[in-house]
Image (tube, grey):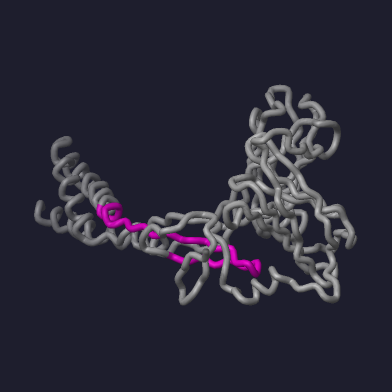
Amino acid sequence: MYKKIVLGLFALAAFLPLAFAPNEARAQHPSVSAAARIDGFDVDPVARPVPGGELVFTLYGSPGGTAAVQIGGATGSAVLVETEAGVYEGTYTIRNRDRITAASTATANLRVGNKVASAILDEPLVGRGVGKPKLRPATSAMAPKIDRFDVDPPANLVAGEELILTLSGTPGGIASARIAGVKGKIVLSEIRAGVYEGSYTVKNRDRIAANAEVTGNLRIDNRETSAVLGQSLVAGANYQSSARQAARLCVNCGVVEAIHVVEVKGQGSYLGPIAGGVAGALLGSQVGHGAGTTIAQVVGLAGGAYAGNEIEKRMKTTKHYEVVVRLENGGSKTISYAAQPGFAVGTRVKLANGTLTVVQ
């Protein structure tokens, strides 16, 4: 009788790893999705944060995702709906319980597959009159400084063409730009110290004139300054596009946009379930008498085998690093590293033969 029970227990221990094998197979192959990217984050502020007031948010970024905004002092969040490819819009109505003030911040999260991008709003949610807030000029020696504000224009302002904006000034800030005729704000990323760059692809709904006013804004903490673009948005006959020429010369150059740590569980062997099963069976033998003891042993064996398998897999867990690079041509690449790479988010790099090198 006991011999049959023991043989049955070992048969069960051998079966358990197979029962959990499908889940382990999925764990060995984590899903890979396109990188999430936020190009712009904008708000129509309220004059006063009173109940019933509406904050209207617009986010520009990777298409096909889900977007939401968390608001400081609010009891809820704003869900943004993708109204067209890569454009998300939503409204938050202020509630009686909310404690939103002029100092409240808003954070947008855009999820595409299993990748998430975040952006913090760089303007107040409240006031400075109704509608868009007016930009404040530099008022002290500590305020940020804008040295240059340029555009690399296309030959024609038609849908699909790209405007490349570059702002140079105080490093370590948050830069953005607004174009008359375009809804929302364009984020300019700091590609190297004091140099901020961003692009905008003309959409069908845009009504942009060649002489449209373009305003660049640079913010550090609560201080900001602005500059107005002094050139046409359409390239002249003799215009030499330095940014586009550079892009052609370095088609594989880009900026590190994100670094993700990916953990992969190891494959359990027969040793973990058997060791755990034996321990569980021994514990079960201490419970009850007769048939009750036998049942407890079987239950202990099953639980112990599963626990042993999980412990062994965790001990064999490995991790690698996925580096997401936003290329200067608008595309993106994800490169996997076994060890932590020697560069950070914002580093300008070049992709060659499946590896990244830092570009000075």
Q: Which residues are magenta?
A: 312-336
Residue at image point 66% right, 49% down: 169
Q: Residue at x 62, y 76 (%)?
A: 249
Q: Which of these two is toward me, 280 or 126?
A: 126
Q: Is residue 346 magenta?
A: no
Identified at 81% across, 62% down, the residue is: 203
- In the picture, residue 327 is in which quadrant? bottom right
Say whether residue 12 is left or right of residue 195. Answer: left
**Residue 321 position by quadrant:** bottom left
Residue found farthest to the front: 141
Q: Residue at x 82, y 75 (%)?
A: 238
Q: Position of residue 36 (x, y in %)?
A: 60, 57
Main SS, magenta region, reads: strand
Give 208 or 306, whichever is nearer the viewer.
208
Q: Is residue 348 left or right of residue 264?
A: right
x and y percentages locating residue 242 in the rendered image: 70, 70
Q: Position of residue 177 (x, y in %)?
A: 75, 51
Query: Does residue 309 lie above or below 282 as drawn?
Result: below
For the residue pair 95 and 306, the one nearer the viewer reads as 95
- Residue 254 spot, x, y in % from top left: 57, 65
Q: How many marks?
A: 0
Which is more toward the observer, 294 or 25?
A: 25
- Specify the quadrant of the image occupied by residue 245: bottom right
Position above or below: 218 against 206: above
- Side of 171 where 49 appears, left or right: right
